[in-house]
Image (cartoon, grey):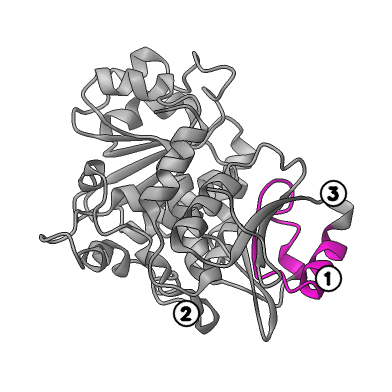
Amino acid sequence: MTKMIKGTTKLLGVIGYPVEHSLSPAMHNAAISHLGADFVYLPFPVKPGDLKAALAGFAAIDLRGFSITIPHKQAVLPLLSEVSPIARSIGAVNTVYRTEKGWCGTNTDVEGFLAPLHPPPTPPCQGGAKDAISPLERGNTAVESSPPPYQARGGSETEAVESSPPPYQARGGSDWSQKVAVILGNGGAARAVVAGCAQLGCAEIHVVGRNEQNLAEFKQSWVNSPMPVQNLQVQAWDNLSRLISQADLLVNTTPVGMHPQGEKSPVAAAALDRISAGAIVYDLIYTPNPTQFLKDSQLRGARTIDGLEMLVQQGAAALKIWLDTESVPVDVMRQALRQHLGLD
């Protein structure tokens, strides 16, 4: 059904350059239509040199909020009136909304990453989503499990999990205090995953990379961050095979295996042979679906999670803030993306 745009319709959007490839309009407009909300979500191509002017223009036309993608996630930080602790820790903002103080920024990637790792809701499913949050509440006190006041207008960000989650949400169990996380890559996506693993309370968090200097800088950046991570270790790629044998959670944050090179995997078959049956292997890539990395892992008895759910859940968390609502139709958003990507 075509969305009726009226004089009262309020604007949301996504900024990036380029932005034509963004999947956000498909999932957000599907949810907005399902809710019957008088909003529309649009893509806005904003060149790097035009970011400050774009924010002023958005304020002038009363844009209610927007998502941020490459190349603006870091550049927007000094232009915002407030930035949440989690966004400062990660060093990137992916969600911006308007308050009386001006533009405020946060990062919902952590919540998106964590959503499939939550324990299942307490039966019956209705009302069980809040029970799924307990692992996060044990994390560092600077984490957004107790968000700053300006985030409260969208409800608690940790409630984006739908009341009837897909079966794989049970895989993480409820106690991560004895579990080892191994993260492939040390870029921006890895920062969100480190923050998520810290919230889960993982006993060990290992980040594996190929550049020794970059790894050292990555580790140092967490020492004085708003959310220090005490149990973070950085490792050379040569140590990967040994680490995989210890991993309860193995996460790929690199672009290796992304379309159009879907036949590639970030981990050699011999190293992946060491994964424990029942370990969780998580690839942030969502196309192809599944990736070769996940196919290989599943053949070895691992439980697998693809990046599509992270994309959906981070979007759901943002939409809650913009619409100032406690609940959004996560299943509708997921289905819209699957159809858009030709996965159904």
| Residue holding disc 3 | 47
Badge 2: how crowded within 10 Å, few (<14), some, or many (20+)?
Answer: few
Any magenta on residue 64? Answer: yes
Question: Residue 336: image x %, image y %?
Answer: 46, 42
Distance from label 2 to label 1 (Cα)? 24 Å
Which residue is at the far bottom? 100
- Please, what secondary structure does the residue beneath circle 1 have? helix
Quick one: label 2 or label 1, which is nearer the N terminus?
1
Span shown in magenta: 51-79
Residue placed most toward the observer, 84 or 30: 30
Separation (CA) of disc 3 from disc 1: 14 Å
Q: Residue at x 20, y 64 (%)?
A: 128
Viewer-closest of 12 and 268: 12
Q: How many marks?
A: 3
- Name the amino acid type tagged 3: Lys
Query: Which residue is identified by label 2?
Result: 152
**Residue sitting at 41 percent across and 44 percent down?**
334
Neighbor class of circle 1 (other Cα within 10 Å; few <14, some 14-19, many 20+) is few
For residue 77, above or below residue 236: below
Q: Is residue 266 above or below residue 101?
A: above
Q: Nearer the viewer, residue 56 or 10?
A: 10
User: Is 102 placed above or below 257 here?
Assistant: below
Seen in the image, is 241 located left or right of residue 147?
left
Q: Write down the residue under mark 1.
A: 56
* For marks 3 and 1 on the same chain, the one whose residue lies earlier in the sequence: 3
Q: Secondary structure at mark 3?
A: loop
Q: Position of residue 315 (x, y in %)?
A: 50, 54
Q: For the residue labelled by badge 2, is the local secondary structure a helix, a strand or a loop?
A: helix
Cα separation between marks 3 and 2: 31 Å
Could you tell me the amino acid type at mark 2? Ala
